[in-house]
Image (cartoon, rainbow, N blue to C red):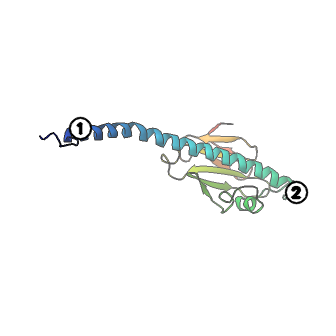
Amino acid sequence: MNKNEKGFSLVELLVVVIIIAIVAAIAIPNLLASRRAANEASAISSLRTIHSAEATYQATIGQGTAYGDLTDLGTQGLVDNVLGGSATPSKSGYDFDQVGTLTDVYCVTAVPTNPGSSGIREFGVGIDGVIYAGAGAGTIGCTAADGVITGGSVIQ
């Protein structure tokens, strides 16, 4: 080799690529787990917001007896445009569904849009304001007749 030749050998480049691959293999699963945890925290926060909005709606517009659906809450400015923009909104990897839109009861469930990827647990809140978490698909339900969440365990 001449003294003026500069650069990296193939072995040196392969070592760098292997090191980058090892770092990526360690970092990517942790990143995905952090994202799922953030989505779950966002879903819980959204359910708290919905419960507060329902209480405000009942006390003001509902004249002490009626609750509103998610679209009503959005129209009144009690929840953001994402949660109040449609009957079944999606936010931060979770689909929200209000079951039992009878005037005197409500309950809302949050189910991962892509179970396992966007979130693992399901969540729900009813007229009692207690947030429940279920371990997986189909573990959270709602009794539309009385606004009570069925399944799961209390997280709040």
Q: Is residue 103 left or right of residue 30?
A: right
Residue at the image position 80 percent from the left and 50 percent from the top: 55
Image position of 113 (left or right of 108): left
Element marked by disc 2: loop
Q: Which residue is mark 1?
A: 12
Q: Position of residue 53 (x, y in %)?
A: 76, 52
In the rendered image, which quarter is residue 153 located in?
A: top right
Residue placed at 68% from the left, 42% from the top?
131
> Furthest-left residue in view?
1
Give, as a three-letter code, the residue at label 2.
Gln
The quadrant in which the C terminus is found is top right
The residue that appears at 70% across and 56% down in the rendered structure is 80
Label 1 Cα crowd, 10 Å radius (few <14 / some 14-19 / many 20+): few
Q: Position of residue 120 (x, y in %)?
A: 52, 43
User: Foreground: 9 or 36?
Assistant: 9
The residue at 33%/40% (across/down) is: 21
| Residue type marked 1 | Glu
Where is residue 61? Give x, y as percent.
Answer: 84, 59
Give the mark, 1 or 2, whose residue is nearer the N terminus: 1
For the question of whether residue 147 can be seen, the reply is: no
Callout 2 environment at 10 Å: few (<14), some (14 to 19), or many (20+)? few
Residue 63's mark? 2
Nearer the observer, 146 or 65: 65
Name the secondary structure under disc 1.
Answer: helix
Q: CA distance from mark 1 to mark 2?
A: 74 Å
Residue lying at the far right of the rendered structure = 63
- In the foreground, 123 or 50: 50
